[in-house]
Amino acid sequence: MKLVVAKRTKRNEYTMAKHNTEKPKNVDYFQVPKPLWKRIKKLFPPVPKKRRRGRPPVDNRAALNGIWYVLWTGCQWKAIHKDWFGVSSSVLHERFQTWQQNGIFDKIMRLMVKFYNKKRKIKWKWQSIDSKSVPAPLGGSETGKNPTDRSKQGAKLHLLVDQRGMPLAVHITGANDHDKWSADDLIISIVVKRPKKKKQHLCADKGYDYDDVHEFVEQERYIAHIKHRRRRGEPVVEECPIPGEKRYPARRWVVERTLGWLTKRRSLRVRWCKKFANWKALVQFACAHILFNCAFFG
């Protein structure tokens, strides 16, 4: 009886490993997942093999593991001990900024969007946009006074996702910038080309219900599903003013869920980076991980 149970258990483990139907239960904060590393390691500059004077160069995998730890825990760079990853905190921060300036994290996100499209196919039919304000205590570029947080310094993360909620475009602004000014930037900055022949719907909340947003969305050949914002002096209408909106189920919640996934990483819950490009690099790295999980595990 024990042999039969053991065989069934091994068979189930082999089936799950073959089809990748189950996500890992716990995230390893100290190490980038091996399948993800195998697909992105070619994007990093090669480490010179010849030994020169001085200390040997730091391995790319070890440096990326340190960045991965900072992304998930939100700790300071100087709080990382050299024994953890074999990299000092100063070298780790310098390597992160060098990779960000060379566009490595932008390439990682683009690669993962293409990988997701190859494995699962991007669901272009229904797309959603939304934003999330986060505090930025240290200030810096692309920050502003948050009107919803007693005018404290903050930043705003704008996101465009497909029907499954997978991020296709990221944009960073100050917390005092209105959402309507970022709609065109999000649509233009989609990392892959949109299909022209397919019918595409765009869902958004009341913050995007402005004439210029509607004009740009129609210009980009979207069917707009923007929640109506009642104007001053306009009577309250119980029925939905958008024609045909009642026929469709709720679609905008997927972008809110993805924003919730991103804020599980503590470096994105509060922006401690003064340079907005550094914080955007962390956001792109997190989006790449979400895309990889959906493509690899389903």
Image (cartoon, grey):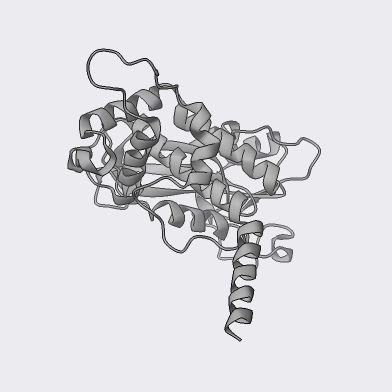
Residue in view at x 24 percent, y 51 percent: 150
Residue in view at x 71 percent, y 63 percent: 248
Residue 264 locus on image (x, y percent): 38, 56
Q: Image height check: is 90 above or below 259?
A: above
Q: Image height check: is 47 above or below 252?
A: above
Residue 61 locus on image (x, y percent): 40, 35
Q: Nearer the viewer, residue 268 or 109?
A: 109
Residue in view at x 43 percent, y 21 percent: 102
277 vs 79, left or right, is right
**If the image is split into quadrants, where does the C terminus sit?**
bottom right
Residue 186 appears anywhere in the view: no
Residue 204 locus on image (x, y percent): 57, 51
Q: Nearer the viewer, residue 285 or 206?
A: 285
Q: Quadrant of residue 279?
A: top left
Q: How many marks?
A: 0
Residue 114 locus on image (x, y percent): 64, 37
Residue in view at x 62 percent, y 54 percent: 164
41 vs 29, left or right, is right
